[in-house]
Structure formats: structure tokens, C-alpha cells
Amino acid sequence: MYVRYDLTSDPGAIDPALAGKKVATLIWTTTPWTLPASLAVAFHPEFEYVALEQGGQVYIVAEALAAAVRENCKLEAAVPVAKFKGARMERATFRHPFLERSILGVVADYVTADTGTGAVHTAPAHGADDFYTGARYGLDQTCNVDNAGRLRNGLPEYEGKTVFQANEPIIELLKRRGVLLGRSDIYHSYPHCWRCHKPVIFRATEQWFIAIDTPMTNSDGTATTFRQRALDEIRNSVKWDPAWGEERIANMIATRPDWCISRQRVWGVPIAVFLCTKCHQPLNDCVLNERVVELFAREGAEAWHTEAADSLLPKGAHCARCGGSEFRRETDILDVWFDSGASWSAVLEAEPGLEPPADLYFEGGDQYRGWFHTSLLTSVGVGAQHASPFRMVGTAGWTLDEQGRAMSKSLGNGVDPVDIADRLGAEIVRLWVASVDFREDVVSSENIMQRLAEGYRKLRNTFRFLLGNLAGFEPARDAVSDPELLPLDRYMLARTRELVEKVCGADGHGGWYGEFQFHRVYQAVNEFCIVDLSSFYLDVLKDRLYTFAPRSVERRSAQTVLWRIAEALVRLVAPILTFTAEEVWQYLPKVEGRAESVHLAEFPKAEALGKADAGLMEEWKKLLATRDEVLKALETERKAGKIGKALEAKVTLRLDAEELALRELLDKYQPSLKELLNISQAELRTGAAAEVECEIGPAEGTKCNRCWNYYADDGPQRVRPFGPWDTVCGRCADALRAMGYSEAVQ
RNA sequence: GGGGCGGUAGCCAAAUGGUGAAGGCGUCCGCCUUAUACGCGGAAGAUAUGCAGGUUCAAGCCCUGCCCGCCCUACCA
């Protein structure tokens, strides 16, 4: 609605063209109940304002809004008689539309030109902008709306009514006074209570504040403001992770207003202060304060609400301001953020063996405004060192659904970790947390959880295979020394070493764990288990593990490395797969001096897994590349129906004479080739082809029914009867002999 | 309105401004063999890293604008 405020100061002082005329301004408001508190009208100092005359009455409104005002206030016939900047309106005076009160013209840059009239009715008791404007002009801040939301000290028309009930009577009042120029219904957003969803009102009330710009004395006698001290700590004494956290919290501290620490609630930590009943001045007495601390230590904060608190008042105490001798207990409580912000004191100062600062504060990104913020302020303000309570602050992003939306009850898109734990296991929840980059917003959904559960099975099965093949393996008795290890086993040990270095650093104190890069740990361990172990090493090893003599050096070599891999891997995953790792730990071979629990053990040391050997890794990279090519060729033959499994194949590699290096490498590893490729026979030849050429043919000779390898019928390993078996290769015969079987007499 | 973060194939996720944008999962096809196929192999999948410009010999990476999502905050007289 639009309300006329008549000018009472000299119109000619605003603009000569207005001299002698009957001048007013028009304000626009959606809250008629605030009009009894109206003390000023605000204009934008830079906006152009026009004076519109109609029927002997001049109205001052913003030029940009003049058209809308004409329409809404039936001023279509008005003619402009003057134009000037809003700054001209400062210190002009107006008559309140229905109270005996002078209204002051003020300027404010928050006045906008998109709605209203460009002249904003200002009630310092009912809005932050208005309050600060009122303070600038020394206006009264008294609020005449009581705690029940009822208007007080007003006209009979609305006295005692709640603010929303008062709207209509006030509108009637305006009509009777002839100052209501226009009225219409509009839809606009209005703040509501987050809890009961009812509209809220703004009211100026007395509160306790911590002044952010209070000077604090430095050791050299100079002073730094509280705000600046906090900023210095942010910049110089804290590591922020992610790094942008520093910018984010610094911006907040740099621009935040004084901290309002009082709340009008029943439950909470009392602001333990006695107030003079006459003038509200707090009684500031060190001895009294100490008594309060003693009382609280003895009986808890609840004691504040008993007469025991009153008895702490010193005899003959009097108010420093008015000399009064009557006092009452303050009933406001502290902002709960003050409580949580003081946890550094409650924990680090109170607990024996601990002291501030904490190594790490970790929370969601919303806590830059919450816990991080208030912890910093309380610690800088009253901590013994007046310094940050933390050395490092880490932050997690938000959890969103698959569409990137925040989870909410109304959308029904929430993923309940407890539900996931119940259905899929708590390990899956941990695995999920580890699998995503928590520094950014993360996505959670049933699908993702299902996938992780499948991934978990892979990890678990990998451990199961490792354990299964270590049955009966006693490291002290059976382990093979490093120089005796087979080449493949030595390589896998080196791969494990690489993994360990990445995951926890060479010394077990760095790496991705040291950087809280858990998702990289997950990715690397996952890939290691799938690619290096499951589909390569473990697969290739089956022949050796299952067909060689149990105590043969070849099998013991494999077991030695399986054991060392398992020992390393279980420690690497322990922080994530808490229970699975412990389960594995208990099944691993017991060794003298080993920790009772994996969670009491340390991360593996890279050096214990051998020295870094770039040359070795390079060789195997080439070997594995060759392996990939052979596997592709084998697949082609399999698709063509020429072979089934790889053991039915013989592979001939033809290498160009130019490929000397590779030829030498393959020659060097010739004895391992058939194992690496999982084939029965491998042959190397020099060919004319430009690149490595892979020729696949059926394996020659006869299949050994024990190890399924094929052997040439005329070779030394040829298949022949042995004991109860009719087709056993020489290698298997040796193994059987070693196992105590005797050769059958033909 | 202000402060901050993010957008890479269905999913997770790499890539000091520099080869055809890793890898894993999932998908599809094939193989019962030696972790019960709880396994193994192969293939396809981003017409180019939200969109549009710009800087550069060179851009997923730097700059500008826009769109979308998220956190915090102020407020709508």
C-alpha cells in the first residue's frame, strides 16, 4: 500500500520550484503494523526523484518508479514540476500519517528502484537496515511491540492487538486520515519460522554482544583488533584443506558483524551476570565471578536458577552506574554456538595430557560459519595464547543424490547409512566414504552402494584366495629368501612396493593416507587387487600352486610372495575395511612378535618389500604388453573355435631382427613365458615381419591329465603313466614323487 | 544480493598448458579351467571434458560471460 507523508519542512529548500507548494512524499509498505514505529523516510542519495503535482498536491517519488506510482495511486493526471537527487531530501521533515510525530528524511544506499516509490518508510525497531539507519541518525530504537507480538503505547485503534491483527485497523486509520493513496494485494516472499512455518517479525531487542573490533593488546604493547587477530591466525597459523577454506572463512571474519551471544531460551548455558534492577547495568565484580565459577563447578549450570546463586551476591553491593542495591539474575542463555565453539577448552584444556591447539578440526563445509568460526573466535578471544584452537581444518562436501540434489525428506531421495549397513554391511558404508573425494560434494545412491558391495566381494575373494593358498605355510620354516624368488614373484613384490609407497609413503607416514586422499587409496588398492593380482598374478600362479610339489622351491617362492603381499595389503586396507582386515589378520600365518590385531600393527614399510628397481619394472611392462597381444590373438582363435582354453595352445612369436631388445628380453624370460601366458608351449623365432607376430596353433603332444598342460610326445617331459595315473607329465611325476607316490611298474 | 565450491562416458575417478582424455566398475560378446563363472579373456562406450567466446604455437586445465547443482550468508521496505 502507498501512504502519504506530508512535508513539514521548507519545500523550497529541496528545490526552488517547490517553494510555497503543498508537498508530500509517498512511501510503500507491505507491513502496515510497522507504521506506528515509523521514524524516518529513506531516499537513495543518487537516484533521481520527481515531484508530481495533481490537484494542488505535490508528490515526491523516484523517477524510475513514477509510472507505476501514477497507476497505483490514481495520479495519471499529475504533471512533473521538479526533478532532483535523493540527497536533497536528507534532513527534510514530514508529518507522521496518524501520530503526533516528526519524521526525518534520511538517505540510504539500500533503497532500490524496482518496487515501491523510492521513498522507504523506516522503523528502526523493525528491521536491520532500518535499525542501522536509525543509529546513524540518532533515532529512537525503542520497540513498542512486546514479547507476545502485541503493539504497545499506541492509539486505541490498535493498542494491544498483535501485529497481524493490527494491520486492518491501521489501514482504516490511514483511510480516515486520507493518506492512503493506493492499496493492492501482492505475492511476495516473507520470512517464516523454520520450525512452525509461521511468519516471523523483526523486533529490536536488548542483547549481549561480543564486539568484533575490540582492540587486543599485543606483547609489544601495540593493539590489534579482535577481528584482525582472528584474521592473522587464519592466514598464518592454520592449514586449510581444501586450500580455499582460508579464503572462505577469512571473508566471513572480515565482514561479520558483532557476535550476538544471547538467546531468550530456557534451556542452555546461562549468561551468569547480575543486572541492576533499576538501570540494567551488569554488576562487574571479579570476586563474584569467581564464586559463580565455583558454584557451577560444584553444582552445575542449573544452580544459576536457584537461590544459591543469589546468595553469592556480596553484601552491600551497589550498581556502579546508578548506585542501586537491587540485582536480578540475567535469564538469557548463551548462543549454543558459543558452547560448541568452546569445545577446545572443554576437551584440550580440561583433559590431562592434552593441550590446545588440536591437530585437526574436521567437519562439513557449513561449519565455516559454525564450529570452525566460533571455535576460532572463542580461542582467540579468551584462550591462554589468544590463538587458533586448531593447526589444521579439513572439510567435507555435501552428500547429494544421483541427480545432484540435496537429500531431503520431502524428496524421499535420502540414503540412510544405517539402512545400508543393515542390508549390505557397515564395510560397504566405509568403502563408499573411502571411494569418493569427500572434499567435494559426493553422490550417494542405492545403485552406487550395490556396485560397491560387488566391489567389496572382489576384494574379499582376493584375500580369501591369498589365505587359502597359504594353508600350512609357515614363514619361519617355508619362506624363500629374496634371491631365490622366481622372477615373476620378485616382480610382484616390487609392484606391491610401489603400491605401498603410493598409499602410505615409503616410511608409512605419508602417501595418500597422509594427505587424506582416501579415494586414491581405494582406487589403487582396488585396481591392484583386480588387475595385478586377480586377473594376472593369482591366475598365473594357479598352475604352480596346484600342481607343483607342495614343498618345492617354486611353490614356496609363490607362497612367500603371497604371504608378504597379504601382510602388506591387509594393513593398507585396515583403516577402511576395519572388520574384514581384522578377520584376514587372524587367518594369516602367526609369526613371532606379530601384533594381536591389524589395528595395532603399523603400515607396511616399502623397504621391507625390496629396493626400487626401475629397470625391472620397465622389463615387465614390456613383457606384459607382449602378453596382452598374445591374449588378443588367443581370443581370436577361441572365437574361431580352434582352441578352448589357453593351455590347449602353442604360441609362436616371430620377432623382426630389428626388435633386438625385445628379443633379448623374451629370451631372458623364456623359461617363464608359458607360465605368464598360461599356455602349454611358447616358442621364439626370428621372422621377417615388421612387428612382433603372434602365431597360434594347437598345443603339440598329449595333455597331462593332472596339470592340463600339453607336452610333446618325444620330449623329456612327455606324458606317460605314473602310479594310478595313466597320463602324467614329467613335471607332475616329479611332484608326485616328491609327495611320496611311487612310480608304477609297468 | 554477497562469500565459496563443483559440472570429465551409465557409476567412481585420473591427467606440471603439450602425444589419439588413464584406470577400475558396469554393459555387451565369448570361455565352465586350476578362487564353486565369487573366475578368465575380448569388445564397445566421451564425435571431445556443462554451454559460448577469448588468451596461447598448444586449453579438460588460464581468462570472460552464461546455464545447472550445492554450502554459507543477507534480505525483499
Image (cartoon, rainbow, N blue to C red):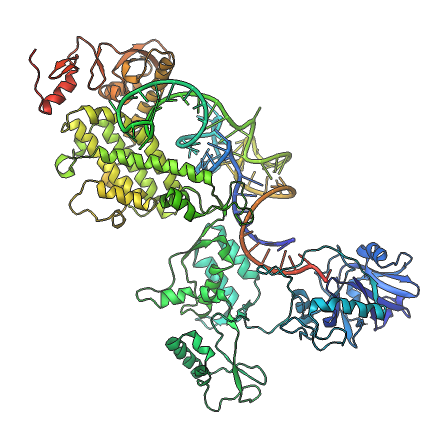
Residue drawn 63% across the image and 60% down it? A192
* Quarter containing the N terminus of chain A: bottom right
Residue A46, given in percent of the width and then of the height, sits at: 76, 60
Residue A524, given in percent of the width and then of the height, sits at: 36, 37
A626 and A458: which one is in front?
A: A458
The answer to whether residue A610 is visible is no
Q: Work out which residue is located at the far left of the displayed protein and give it.
A: A745
Question: In the rendered view, would you say A109 is above or below B21?
Answer: below
Q: Work out which residue is located at the far bottom of the displayed protein and give it.
A: A316
The quadrant holding residue A53 is bottom right
Q: Is residue B5 left or right of residue A57?
A: left
A237 and B6: which one is in front?
A: B6
Residue drawn 52% across the image and 89% down it? A318
The answer to whether residue A26 is visible is yes
Q: Is residue B28 left or right of residue A725?
A: right
Q: Is residue A559 left or right of residue A8?
A: left
Residue B11, given in percent of the width and then of the height, sits at: 48, 37
* Quarter containing the C terminus of chain A: top left
Question: In the rendered view, would you say A341 is above or below A505?
Answer: below
